[in-house]
Amino acid sequence: MKPSLCLVIDEMHPNLPELLQPLGVELHYRPDLKAAEVPAALAAHPYDGLIVRSKVRVTAGLLAQAPQLRYVCRAGAGVDNIDEEALAAAGVTLLNAPEGNRDAVGEYAVGLLLALFRNIVRADREVRAGEWKREANRGEEVGGKTIGLLGYGHMGKAFAKRLQAFDCTVLAYDHDPACEANHHATLVSLAELQARAEVLSIHVPYSPANHHFVNEEFLAGFGNALWLLNTARGEVLDHAALVQRLQTGQLRGAALDVLENEKLATLSPEQQARFEYLRAAPNVVLSPHVGGWSFQSYERINQVLARKLREFLVG
Ligand SMILES: NC(=O)c1ccc[n+]([C@@H]2O[C@H](COP(=O)([O-])OP(=O)(O)OC[C@H]3O[C@@H](n4cnc5c(N)ncnc54)[C@H](O)[C@@H]3O)[C@@H](O)[C@H]2O)c1
Ligand SMILES: O=C(O)[C@H](O)COP(=O)(O)O
């Protein structure tokens, strides 16, 4: 195996060296780097590998700093911060690790669904405030509901698998005709998903083509007033349509692990107004992009990357 010199710019589980050292990979572990410092750091040594989470966008400009680069590892699932065309043009291989955090996301989506249906977060806040409101917290059961998954890849499948424990119908729409079906969900057309779903759970990646894919027109195509879950990326969902539909009751509630702008200190006035609505809404559950973050996934992501890197370096 050819030795490899690899720059790591984001924080990783400490199992990384013991997993990659047997592959002949020497790591320069620099999670301390600020985004603006990454290009110079990449140019400073003859790196043939780069391991990132989401600190930087990997663009043609960044790749130009390391003409000898052979691979980029995305320690996670989403590759929306990586210009895949630029990598292909530069002959650089991209490896990601959705197998490492799909179980975390699948479980978390169940948690969000239950929190939303049974008012768990709101009820907790009320009891802590000394309020004992039983009737206002009467909830919905998952049993009997039709859950619609938008995107049936690693994350959609992980959620569908866990929904088998509930007596519900799981439908999935995926635009890839080669999408592998399994018995955890029925693959349907978008029109059928829109006609039947009572809950819409977003599992498509962000890309320019998916920018605001779930918008007013898309949501208006549904036959039922929906509950909405988003554990994918905030930018897939048009938050203006989200807020407007929550305000009018056309959406029954929403659980959002991801937001249109997750840097809360940098919200535009419009984003701030929408955020103020969401944070005050009793039928909204919010979390800080932690669906894929568990102690287990933190370790497993590196194990998945090590397996894929072994195949790449040996093959
Ligand atoms: N909240 C978190 O912590 C967390 C963790 C992991 C992943 N994610 C997000 O989940 C996304 C999905 O991850 P994945 O591993 O399941 O990806 P994946 O590539 O395995 O699956 C995505 C599926 O969506 C389909 N798709 C894409 N655009 C579509 C569209 N417009 N209409 C219908 N189908 C479409 C694709 O064909 C694919 O099958 C990631 O890109 C990431 O943004 C979030
Ligand atoms: O895509 C993912 O794996 C998750 O959204 C986590 O992303 P992060 O590593 O950028 O936190």
Image (cartoon, rainbow, N blue to C red):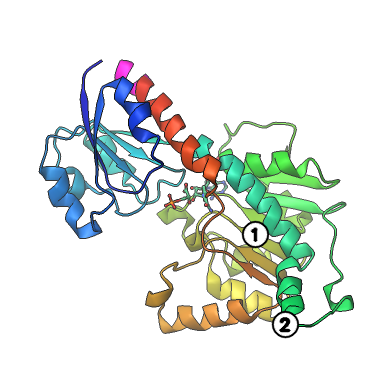
User: Does 90 sit left or right of 188 as displayed?
Assistant: left
Q: Residue at x 59, y 34 (%)?
A: 179
- Percent x, y of residue 289: 51, 59
On the question of residue 198 being in view, the answer is yes
Residue located at (54% from left, 48% from top): 292
Residue at x-position 63% and y-position 81%: 280
- Residue under label 2, please give it: 129
State if disc 1 and disc 2 touch (CB < 8 Å): no
Q: Which residues are magenta?
A: 311-315
Image quarter of residue 5: top left
The image shows residue 185, relative to residue 225, as above or below, that is: above
Taking 256 as reference, is 89 above or below it?
above
Label 1, on which residue? 229
Q: How many marks?
A: 2
**Secondary structure character of the magenta stretch overall:** helix
Closer to the camera in the image, 311 or 21 = 21
Q: Quadrant of the N terminus?
A: top left
Residue 80 drawn at (x, y percent): 40, 50
- The tag earlier along the polypeptide, 2 or 1, is 2
Element type where label 1 sits in the image: strand
How far from the left and from the top, in percent, is residue 182?
70, 31
For label 1, being within 8 Å of ligand 1 is answered: no
Using the rendered image of the protein, determine whether residue 175 is visible from the camera's viewpoint. no
